Amino acid sequence: MRVLAIETSCDETGVAILEGSSFADSFSFTVLGEALLSQAELHRDYGGVYPTLAKREHEKNLPTILAEALKKAGMKEPADVDAIIVTSGPGLEPALWTGITFAQDLAKKWKKPLFASNHMEGHFVASLVQDGLLSGISFPILALLVSGGHSEFIRVDDWFRYSIVGQTLDDAVGECFDKVARMLGLQYPGGPEISRLAKHARDSDLPQSTAALPRPMIHTDNCDISFSGLKTAALYALRDMGGIETLSENDKAAFAREFEDSVAEVFVHKARRALVETGASMFALGGGVAANKHLREVLADTITKDFPDVEIRVPDPSLTGDNAVMIAQAALLHFLIGDWKLDRPHADIKANGNLSLEPSDI
Ligand code: KG4
Ligand code: ZN
């Protein structure tokens, strides 16, 4: 079957047309056409995503992005798809509404059923897919979803059966990367910038930063995490070092490495605990921060060493950030396992900024 998915939850405008099929316990997804436009550059002056600007840009760009995806798929309007899918949350509400309204108009015009999809579920499913194939899955799966809005450990007992094992009590890790990057005078989005500096510090074997950042909640008796204290600690540490104007590029790189080490150590500890708690047979890392090479590496090293029977899945690097392919993959999976029916489209779709990946939301 074929779907066309629309993603506008944050600052990426994405449209993707995918074909999906299933055989035994495996599912395959083929991208027929995809177009993705990042607004990151426009939000740079604000140091983060500015919702009104995101909404305006989605509105402006959606028709062009749709046309581009259709062209790549060799399709004309109305597209030869069975359903239209739109992200309804979590995300920035004005941005989500733009996609929802656009999808509703399109569904009406093309006379296609419309379905609402969960953004985090998209990140989760995309983390399991390898070269377009979703196979070899054994439950329970422990998913660590890390993005600009979420940081959560989720136990997945079967397709679409989720329970939260631990989560951030305040900021998301991606937001923390972005804020600390801003303190260092780096541009938005800060995750890739910090990563680049930290890599330089590691590759060049720079001396340890004079700042020693905390590893928040590392020894607490649960799988929850917290990043607001780390953010404040970074602010004070930079001030105590005399402000960023006084720091050399190498000082900044060493600081970025210390920050990345702090985040990674916390996730490694909590992942270990969550794996013991859930007895998971697979570990999936998803979301924008899953692009972080150091985090991927230290998690993989720890799990391979301490939990040799646990299979690790990480998304294709091109699918870690927000995109419509992952939204289409998750929706196709719903159809292929018979959970969604084409003749039962979702009615009354609303944007929900606060959605998480819990059973009640699906
Ligand atoms: O999933 P995503 O694209 O959007 C949301 O759903 O939030 O995640 C965006 C976040 C941003 O905070 C960005 O700085 C972070 O992912 N990010 C990274 C890296 N690449 C993107 N964080 C750390 N290291 C990276 N390489
Ligand atoms: Zn995301």
Image (cartoon, rainbow, N blue to C red):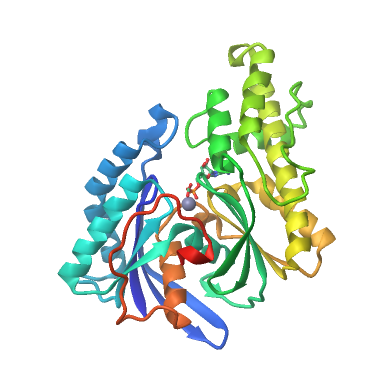
Looking at the image, residue 293 sits to the left or right of residue 191; the answer is: right
Identify whether 54 is placed above or below 130. Answer: above
Q: Residue at x 44, y 83 (%)?
A: 338
User: Most extreme residue toward the left, as rendered?
Assistant: 109
Of 340 and 332, the residue lying toward us:
340
Please tell me which residue is depicted at 55% across the width and 55% down the height of the picture: 317
Left or right of residue 195, residue 207 in this image: right
Q: Nearer the viewer, residue 333 or 34?
A: 333
Residue 227 visible to an observer of this rendering: yes
**Residue at far bottom of view:** 24
Q: Viewer-proximal residue, 216 or 41? A: 216
Residue drawn at point x = 55 percent, y = 81 percent: 26
Q: Position of residue 240 (x, y in %)?
A: 69, 14
Asked whether the viewer can see residue 77, the reply is no
Q: Position of residue 334 (x, y in %)?
A: 45, 75
Q: Is residue 60 above or below residue 136?
A: above
Q: Quadrant of residue 162?
A: bottom right
Q: Is residue 92 left or right of residue 136?
A: left
